[in-house]
Image: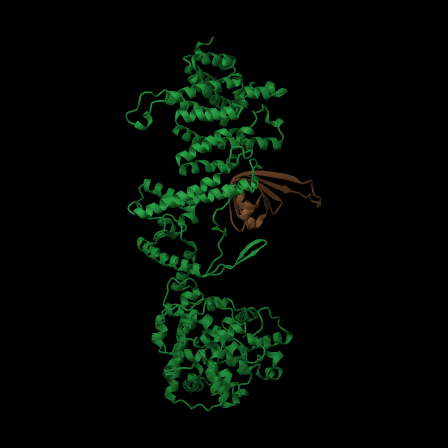
């Protein structure tokens, strides 16, 4: 049933292509995740996103080295270029 | 140099003897190797006595005059000409490699790209690679040097810098361990075992090797005669030494013995010698053309010292006369001076270098189709250009257009992009780029893109000739033979709806097709060429047909829910495609498309899953809920922005009969009040009804526009009236529920019901938004009123009576802000005025 669609998909990036113009979820190194509308990407997984919400997961450490409970920071960016070396996964 | 590492391990007994000396001998091999070797062989004492090595005048003259010439024929397999040729500075050690390549590559010593390319016959300034470029340089040297000792000049000179970079086996170990290598004579490779080639790049030194190396590093300081010469070694000299040393080891190990015959044949010499040097030499030539002519220097002597020494080793060379010696000395000084003067340009880029870099860079930008490969840059530059023109900055060609359909991928204002380059330079650049692009195109045809298909996609190997494309999207040229282009392979009347993946895939295909079509339209041939225009039209039409098939509009209505076409315009991506599609479709197809759309309107996401009425307090919602609402709102907004204008356009082209037909279809196939309760539904019906009204209300033919002046067909009018009456009667009981405020009121529960419409100042903005949405519905009922017969108008007012009163009262309520009150009144009046009434008449 998916044959026709699959025949045109020969490599992983073809799947990313299907998400162009859609909101995607991207997991980044450094405990960050972002969601945004995918505008462009390349072979290095550099991506351009708009209406981005970035989520950073932080664990603060007290002076005596005890970790505090993890907290989350969020920020919104209108338009964002993400360098590909930080991308771990892209999800539609 | 590299051979040095084989030194101790292979020939320990000789190593002990040679450790001191040969380093010094070799130290001058840059241009003195023949001499030193001569001295070495001649005196015999040289082996014991360091001093003998430094009898420069004698040995140089002897070596150069005698040894070089004698054996040149044998060496090069050709007549070498006069003696003076030996001193030709600019002649290269190149001759050997041309034959040597085969062997040298066979031994795996050299990584050369040269063999991949055929030698070029003519000078090609737009060479694709550096290889090509230098290989095709005009043989200036061949005219100036008269040295006919090049069996294949083109290949011989075609070594490249690449080669230098590609042979770490030769250079890297020494550079790494001996930092002073640039100024210090390179150590000899004399002791390297014949059987043992230069060490591999990753060669790990043994203890003895390191010892030997350290000993050797200490040596140069002891050699007193050398310093002046040592300094003048240029990069080429050192390179050449390295090359020689890779050649020499077998002979150096047995200097006193007659060589095996095969050693003397030129084919034995690895092509290494020429690889790096010749390109640099070419560069130097371009920088200092006078060098090649002015100094009849010892190019050959330098280049082939090993042959000289080998051959003369067993002979007794005649002594040169004192005058000759003096001449040689002078010559030598001149060479030294020249090299010194050149040396200060080491590590600097010459103009040809810069040219070459520019060419590489430009070739990356060059594309056969500037619009396709860099669409956004082109559009951006077009916008910028128009702005500049409007600012009166004159009209300069900003896109580097090269011929028909060729150009640089990125255009930009000339002044900014190319700095101070003038118009002249620009035109020159254009012609250059044109040739470059052609060259590149030719190359791309030849070079097969070695792509390894693997599980993780395709691995493309890039090189200078065929740089890896940043994004390799395979363009399959398979003919489209899908059965009615349905993505599902199912047959039968009913099929499953397209999956998300299929939809996205189909959309990408559509986008590709649309982009191609738009590009095709831009490439319209000149209006004079009739046949071309014919062809072009046909091509465009074929493309449109493909698009039409891919839209799947002609699939049976009930084939799936949602219909494939509806599936396509459900995502925002598809909605954005809609207006671009309509531009290309012929009218009958657009009408078919609209009919389908109207018939399956309920299947649209924006209708079936219309955003729920707003709640008073969004904090009551979960996050997922909020996101979902936002998404649906965004989809609706996009639908109204992208699809509805297209729908309006198509409706405006329809006659009354068609409009009536569409309304009938909608009324039959869907519950109109449900559709009308959504913004897209309201927009669709408003468009249909107002078009009908405008057709009915213009009985007076417009003399300016005879197309529009067809009188309304009574049958059509009759059909319309019937359809509309039915439509209105179905809708009438639900009329008050169409208003978003009513819907919100209905949906509200708990505290939200009280908050809604309350005096919350924060809600004011939402309230205004609500009024705007109300206005859409008021506009719709106004069109209903205009179309309705008189008795129906009464019914209409009756159905809306409460709503009207409520709205007018709310507008007059003191707590309502002035702005919102005005909006409310305007909304009501929109409807009432259509009936000849006004809100002010209401008590």
Chain in brown colour:
A
| Residue B374: x %, y % from top left | 43, 48
Query: Farthest residue in the top direction?
Result: B843
| Residue B175: x %, y % from top left | 54, 69
Which residue is more in the foreground, B713 or B297? B713
Question: Chain B appears in which tint?
Answer: green
User: Does residue B819 appear anywhere in the picture?
Assistant: no
- Total labels: the figure holds 0
| Residue B552: x %, y % from top left | 49, 38
Quadrant for the N terminus of chain B, please: bottom right
Is B538 on the left-hand or right-hand side of B728? left
Is A22 on the left-hand or right-hand side of B661? right
* Colour logic: by chain
Q: Residue at x 47, y 40 (%)?
A: B549
Task: Residue B351: name its quadrant.
Answer: bottom left
| Residue B672: x %, y % from top left | 51, 23
In the picture shown, does residue B116 fall above or below B614? below
Task: Residue B612: name its quadrant.
Answer: top right
In the picture shown, does residue B174 fall above or below B624? below
């Amino acid at each position: 049933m998916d044959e026709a669609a699959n025949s045109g998909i020969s490599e992983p990036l073809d799947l990313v292509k299907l998400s162009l113009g859609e909101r995607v979820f991207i997991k980044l190194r450094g405990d960050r995740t972002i969601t945004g509308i995918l505008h462009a990407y390349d072979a290095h997984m550099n991506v351009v996103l708009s209406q981005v919400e970035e989520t950073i997961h932080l664990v603060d450490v007290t002076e005596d080295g005890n970790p505090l409970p993890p907290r989350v920071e969020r920020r919104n960016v209108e338009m964002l270029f993400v360098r590909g070396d930080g991308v771990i996964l892209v999800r539609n | 140099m590299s051979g040095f590492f084989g030194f101790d391990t292979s020939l320990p007994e000789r190593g002990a003897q040679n450790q001191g000396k040969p380093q010094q001998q070799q130290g001058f091999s840059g241009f003195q190797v023949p001499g030193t070797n001569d001295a070495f062989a001649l005196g015999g004492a040289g082996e014991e006595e360091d001093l003998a090595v430094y009898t420069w005048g004698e040995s140089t003259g002897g070596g150069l005059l005698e040894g070089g010439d004698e054996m040149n024929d044998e060496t090069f397999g050709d007549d070498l000409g006069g003696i003076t040729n030996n001193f030709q500075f600019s002649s290269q050690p190149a001759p050997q490699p041309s034959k040597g390549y085969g062997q040298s590559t066979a031994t795996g010593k050299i990584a050369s790209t040269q063999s991949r390319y055929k030698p070029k016959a003519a000078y090609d300034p737009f060479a694709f690679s550096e290889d090509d470029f230098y290989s095709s340089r005009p043989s200036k040297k061949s005219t100036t040097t008269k040295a006919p000792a090049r069996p294949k000049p083109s290949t011989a000179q075609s070594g490249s810098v690449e080669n230098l970079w590609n042979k770490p086996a030769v250079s890297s170990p020494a550079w790494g361990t001996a930092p002073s290598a640039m100024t210090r004579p390179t150590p000899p490779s004399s002791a390297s075992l014949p059987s043992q080639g230069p060490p591999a790049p990753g060669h790990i030194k043994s203890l003895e090797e390191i010892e030997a190396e350290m000993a050797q590093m200490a040596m140069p300081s002891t050699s007193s005669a050398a310093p002046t010469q040592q300094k003048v070694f240029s990069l080429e000299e050192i390179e050449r030494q390295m090359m020689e040393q890779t050649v020499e080891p077998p002979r150096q190990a047995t200097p006193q013995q007659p060589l095996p015959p095969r050693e003397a044949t030129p084919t034995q010499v690895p092509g290494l010698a020429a690889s790096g040097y010749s390109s640099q030499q070419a560069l130097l030539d371009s920088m200092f053309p006078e060098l090649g002519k002015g100094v009849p220097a010892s190019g050959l002597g330098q280049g082939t010292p090993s042959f000289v020494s080998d051959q003369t080793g067993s002979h007794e060379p005649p002594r040169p006369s004192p005058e000759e010696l003096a001449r040689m000395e002078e010559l030598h000084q001149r060479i030294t001076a020249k090299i010194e003067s050149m040396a200060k340009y080491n590590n600097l880029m010459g103009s040809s270098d810069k040219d070459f870099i520019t060419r590489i860079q430009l070739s990356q930008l060059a594309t056969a189709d500037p619009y396709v490969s860099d669409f956004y840059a082109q559009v951006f530059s077009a916008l910028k250009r128009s702005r500049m023109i409007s600012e009166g900055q004159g009209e300069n060609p900003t896109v580097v257009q090269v011929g028909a359909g060729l150009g640089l991928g990125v255009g930009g204002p000339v002044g900014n992009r190319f700095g101070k380059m003038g118009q002249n330079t620009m035109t020159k650049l254009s012609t250059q780029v044109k040739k470059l692009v052609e060259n590149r195109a030719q190359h791309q045809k030849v070079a097969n893109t070695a792509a390894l298909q693997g599980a993780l996609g395709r691995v493309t190997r890039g090189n200078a000739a065929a740089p890896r494309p940043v994004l390799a999207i395979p363009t399959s040229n398979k003919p489209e033979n899908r059965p009615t282009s349905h993505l599902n392979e199912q047959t039968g009347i009913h099929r499953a709806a397209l999956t998300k993946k299929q939809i996205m895939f189909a959309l990408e295909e559509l986008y590709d097709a649309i982009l191609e079509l738009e590009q095709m339209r831009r490439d319209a041939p000149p209006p004079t060429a009739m046949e071309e225009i014919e062809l072009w039209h046909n091509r465009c039409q074929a493309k449109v047909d493909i698009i039409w098939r891919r839209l799947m509009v002609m699939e049976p209505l009930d084939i799936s829910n949602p219909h494939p076409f509806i599936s396509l315009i459900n995502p925002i991506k598809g909605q954005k495609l809609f207006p671009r599609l309509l531009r290309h479709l012929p009218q009958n197809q657009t009408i078919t498309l609209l009919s389908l759309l109207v018939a399956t309107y309920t299947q649209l996401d924006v209708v079936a899953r219309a955003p729920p009425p707003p709640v008073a307090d969004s904090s009551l919602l979960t996050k997922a809920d909020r996101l979902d609402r936002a998404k649906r709102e965004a989809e609706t907004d996009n639908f109204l922005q992208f699809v509805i204008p297209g729908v309006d356009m198509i409706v405006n082209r329809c006659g009354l009969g068609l409009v009536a037909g569409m309304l009938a279809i909608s009324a039959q196939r869907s519950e109109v009040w449900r559709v009308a309760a959504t913004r897209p539904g309201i927009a669709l019906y408003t468009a249909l009804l107002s078009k009908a009204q405008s057709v009915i209300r213009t009985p007076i033919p417009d003399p300016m526009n005879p197309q529009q002046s067809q009188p309304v067909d009574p049958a059509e009018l009759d059909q319309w009236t019937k359809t509309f009456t039915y439509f209105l009667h179905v809708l009438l009981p639900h009329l008050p529920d169409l208003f978003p405020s009513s819907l919100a009121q209905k949906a509200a529960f708990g505290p939200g019901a009280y908050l809604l419409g309350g005096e919350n100042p924060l809600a004011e903005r939402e309230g205004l938004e609500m009024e705007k949405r109300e206005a859409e519905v008021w506009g719709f009922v106004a069109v209903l009123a205009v179309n309705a017969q008189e008795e129906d108008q009464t019914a209409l007012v009756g159905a809306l009576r409460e709503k009207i009163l409520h709205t007018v009262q709310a507008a007059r309520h003191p707590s309502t802000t002035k702005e919102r009150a005005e909006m409310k009144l305007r909304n009501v009046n929109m409807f009432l005025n259509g009936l000849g009434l006004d809100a002010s008449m209401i008590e």
